[in-house]
Image: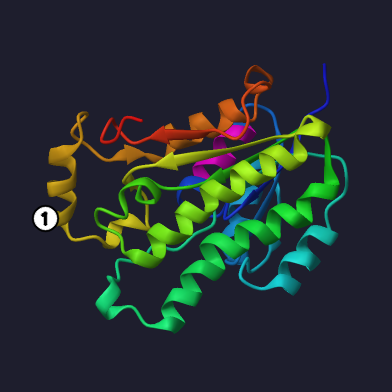
Amino acid sequence: MSPARMIAVVGGASGIGASTARTLAAAGDSLIILDRDGEAAAALAAAIGARALTLDVADADSVARAFAALEAPLYGLVVSSGVVDTGKLASLDVARWNEILAVNLTGVFLCCRAASPLLAEGGRIVTLGSLAARTGGVITGAAYAASKAGVEALTKSMAQELAPRSITVNCVSPGAIDTPMTARHPAEQKARYDAIVPLRRHGRAEEVAAAIRFLLSEEASYLTGAVIPVNGGVRMD
């Protein structure tokens, strides 16, 4: 039997990250769950036989400390941390803009930079984008859309840079998914969104986790720099 793969899941204590952690643990992978909510991360880790660490992706020192506690070789990194924001241009101040980009974009950069030296030859990185990167945001606002567009570009840049080590870097781009993050959206707003989705519903976190699991697999070894939409067909490109 081959040894279990070691995979770090950032933002793994809730939502898509937690569903990903459960999916990977069920498949036999060894996991490290990293999240700002250390208590929730520890609880999930205990439930699935994983290890938990606390980190704040918006704090470069916190990211550096957390990844310094990890041991090479690391097979995979999933960066699913993020915050949603619906602020439009007229109501968006600079402080909130900087906060969203610090978590959703700079945090991805910091985690990937810290993990890169730990990744084994042929390793995997999966980032989380959003439909908003392509649409400008149906429900979400300017800062969120801009941050997720940046994640797509960063993913493609890293894919080129890490290819000589046979490390693939791909992005999963969900549409609206039923998670605690989207639970704050008004019901009528969610219903309007579902009405324009060909599959007529929000997605489920485990459906996104399945796409992430595929990108971490050997079957995806020739796929890099890709943005994989999981959006119910609301945008097909």
State the residue in front, 3 or 92.
92
Q: What residue appears at the point 55 percent right and 48 percent down from the top-left corner?
A: 153
Q: Position of residue 187 (x, y in %)?
A: 15, 56
Specify the amino acid type for callout 1.
Glu
Residue 8 located left or right of residue 184? right
Q: Residue furthest right?
A: 72
Q: Secondary structure at mark 1?
A: helix
Residue 213 located left or right of residue 91? right
Is residue 79 among the parts visible in the rendering?
no
Task: Report which quarter residue 11 is drawn in.
Answer: bottom right
Q: Position of residue 9 (x, y in %)?
A: 64, 48
Residue 83 located left or right of residue 47? left
Residue 78 located left or right of residue 67? left
- Give the vertical position of 162 relative to 92 (above or below): above
Q: Which residue is mark 1?
A: 188
State the residue in front, 153 or 213.
153
Q: What residue appears at the point 19 percent right and 29 percent down from the top-left corner?
A: 198
Q: Which residues are magenta?
A: 18-25
